[in-house]
Structures are given as structure tokens and as C-alpha cells.
Amino acid sequence: LSVISNALKVWGLELILFNSPEYQRLRIDPINERSFICNYKEHWFTVRKLGKQWFNLNSLLTGPELISDTYLALFLAQLQQEGYSIFVVKGDLPDCEADQLLQMIRVQQMHRPKLIGEELAQLKEQRVHKTDLERVLEANDGSGMLDEDEEDLQRALALSRQEIDMEDEEADLRRAIQLSMQGSSRNISQDIPQTSGTNLTSEELRKRREAYFEKQQQKQQQRKQQQQQGDLSGQSSHPCERPTTSSGALGSDLGDAMGEEDMLQAAVTMSLETVRNDLKTEGKK
């Protein structure tokens, strides 16, 4: 303190303790002063009025900090609570270029300066965060590509499964249609008597002939019964009229006769083929 006081005396300046009883009795508003020197342990800095505005010229900050007139008293009180000793600089300060410039313009500070150590710590933290973020992004990029490839593979597999299922369903449907057609063709072939006996034994042919003749006898009996019933109904409704036959009835009788002749011819053919097969087998013996 004595060194600073002696240096200021060269410029005609004097230091007075801000919180001393002598200065407090003067009841001077801090904004009416020109400069303050603040000290805490080995650190010294200045709060000075340049132009018409106050600035905190602490070297620990990244730049000058603008202090409003209403905040100046609170700022000094806060420094005192933190343990700072505050001195008022009395006398006419030497002229400086910054003071002359700020006499004409006022400063508007958008962002308050930060402590140098705080800014360095933030920059370091930002760099670390950026590095970690880049690593995460790189890892995510790679895994993202893998995830996308896996998703595409899963989609392709799902589509192939669907196509296979559809093909299986279509194949099952085709097989069911074929089986149904085969079943219907078998039923039809069973209803029609076969004229070829090369694949049938003589016992099977005999049984089929017996079934065929029994069926023919049943049909003849049914037709006789139907004819008798028709005659009785015609006599009861028209006793004086003679029964007549229509062309439709004649056509049906002829159709039945032709059908019976074809069936009889088929039966004769089957019996002849049976005889031939028996003769062949006996000749081979």
C-alpha cells in the first residue's frame, strides 16, 4: 500500500480508506468520485469512471465490466463483504484517450465478461464435450448404419416369408382343386361301366355283370310300376277315352331302349373279353 501511495503522490493523488470513519462522515455518494482501488491479499484492481460510466477494470476478467450508477454502491458493498479493502483515489486524474472518447459516446454491454479461469474451464469443458460428442456421433453413425442394414435385412426376410406363405397357400389351393377334380372324375368313372377288361379279373367282371343286370331289372320294374300307375290314373279321370301316347313319351322310351342296347352291348363285350383272357391264361399254362 505504501508503494502505491508513494507512486500516486507523484501525480498529486491521495488514497483514502473508503470505509474509514473519516470518509463515512463526509457522506459522499460513490458515483461522484472518479476512481477506487480494491485490494484482497496480493490482488489489486481498479474501478474507474471513464466518460460518464463506471467500469470494473479487474485483470482477472476477460474485459472491462460496465457498472451502472445504481449498481456501483452495491458492488462496492459486495466487495467489502468478500474481504476487499477499498480506497478512494482523491485528486485530478491524468487525462487518457479512453476517458475523452467515452465523454462523447456511451457504451452498451450485451454480455458481461467472465473470469479468465472460468472461461478457460468452460472452453476446456466444451472441447471435452465436443470430443465426446464426436466420438458418440461416430459410434452412432457406425451403429446407425448397422441398425439400418439390420432393419433392411429384417424387412427383406419378412417380405420373403410372406411370399413363401402366399406360394404355399396357392400350392395348397391348387392341390385341393386337383384332388377334388380327381375325386369327381373317379366318381364319374365308377358310375360308367368300363368296356375294357384288361385290368380286371374274371371275378370282378362277373360281379360287375351281376350288378349291372340287377340294376337293369330294377329299372324295368320301376318303369312298369310307373306305367301301371299312369294307366290307372288315366282310366279314373277319363273312363270313355282310350289312352294315348305322346311323342315325348315315345322319345323317352326310345331313349331308354337305346341306352339299354348300349349297356347290353357293353356287357357282351365285357363277357367276350373275359373269355379271351381265360383262354389266354389256359394256353400259357
Image (spheres, rainbow, N blue to C red):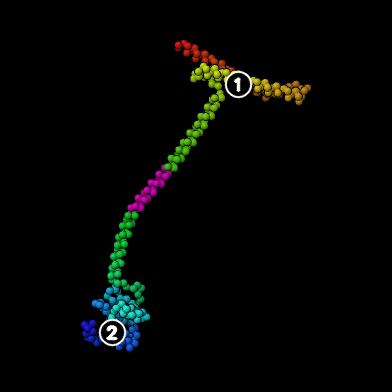
**121 and 276: which is toward the camera:** 121
> Which residues lie in the magenta part?
141-160
At horizontal 33% and vertical 77% (from top left) the residue drawn is 66
Cα–Cα gap, marks 2 and 1: 143 Å
Determine which residue is flagged by label 1.
Answer: 215
Mark 2 and mark 1 lie on one chain; the one further toward the N terminus is 2
Q: Which residue is situated farthest in the right direction here?
A: 240
At horizontal 45% and vertical 12% (from top left) the residue drawn is 284
Classify residue 77 by image quadrant: bottom left
Amino acid on which the number 2 mark rests in the picture:
Leu
Relative to 79, residue 185 above or below: above
Quadrant location of the N terminus in the rendered image = bottom left
Q: Position of residue 182 (x, y in %)?
A: 51, 29
Q: Main secondary structure of the magenta part?
A: helix
Give the SS element for disc 2.
strand
Classify residue 61 by image quadrant: bottom left
Q: Position of residue 8 (x, y in %)?
A: 23, 84
Magenta-colored stretch includes residue 145: yes
**Residue 104 appears anywhere in the view:** no
**Residue 285 appears anywhere in the view:** yes
Q: Position of residue 170 (x, y in %)?
A: 47, 37
Relative to 122, residue 152 above or below: above
Q: Which mark is residue 17?
A: 2
Quadrant location of the C terminus in the rendered image = top left
Classify residue 76 by image quadrant: bottom left
Give the SS element for disc 1.
helix
